[in-house]
């Protein structure tokens, strides 16, 4: 019987195109990098500029409109959703100008001021 691989989190960041940091959950660093390339559309030259590090699964971060959570908690929440189709997944991301992360819980609609 095949032994299942342990899931890990990888922080993939760049400051030259989208100025974005994503935390990707998968079984290997290579899968995280190339899955990000295929989904975001980085060129081979841009791939060489990506900063990649292992992200601790239990580190707590603040996700806008959701609160404090960890990558491990987001994995547990994600696999219970109807739309979950397997790994890799992005559990949260952060734009470089923000001091908080975002994910599917974050509200992206800007509210219009009322008089």
Image: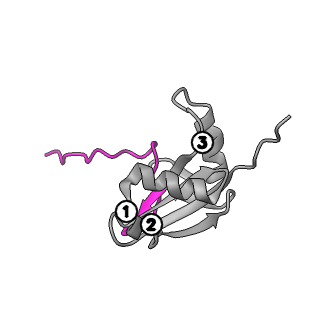
Q: What residue do we see at 78% from left, 42% from top?
A: 4
SS assignment at label 2: helix
Query: In this figure, what is the number of numbered marks?
Result: 3
How far from the left and from the top, in percent, is residue 35?
Answer: 50, 51
Image: magenta residue range: 93-115
Q: CA distance from mark 1 to mark 2?
A: 6 Å
Q: Are marks 1 and 2 in contact (CB under 8 Å)?
A: yes
- Residue 36 horizontal side relative to residue 97, left or right: right
Disc 1 marks which residue? 43
The crowding category of the residue bearing disc 3, from other C-alpha atoms within 10 Å (few below 14, some 14 to 19, many at least 20), is some
Residue 62: give x, y in percent of width and height. 53, 58
Q: Residue at x 53, y 59 (%)?
A: 33
Where is residue 11? Give x, y as percent: 55, 63
**In the displayed structure, would residue 66 be above or below residue 99?**
above
Of label 1 and label 3, which has the lower sequence position?
1
Kindly report which numbered mark, 1 or 3, lies closer to the viewer in this rendering: 1
Instruction: Say if residue 64 shows up in the picture.
Output: no
Residue 114 at x, y percent in the picture: 17, 45
Residue under circle 3?
87
Q: Residue furthest front?
A: 44
- Magenta stretch prevailing secondary structure: loop
């Amino acid at each position: 019987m095949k032994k299942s691989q342990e899931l890990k989190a990888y922080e993939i960041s760049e400051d030259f195109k989208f100025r974005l940091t994503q935390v990707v959950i998968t079984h290997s660093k290579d899968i995280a990098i190339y899955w990000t390339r295929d989904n975001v559309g980085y060129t081979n030259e841009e791939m060489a500029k990506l900063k990649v590090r292992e992200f601790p699964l239990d580190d707590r971060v603040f996700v806008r409109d959701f609160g404090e959570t960890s990558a491990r908690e987001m994995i547990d929440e994600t696999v219970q959703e109807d739309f979950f189709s397997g790994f890799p997944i992005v559990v949260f991301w952060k734009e470089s100008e923000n001091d908080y992360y975002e994910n599917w819980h974050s509200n992206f609609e800007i509210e219009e001021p009322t008089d």
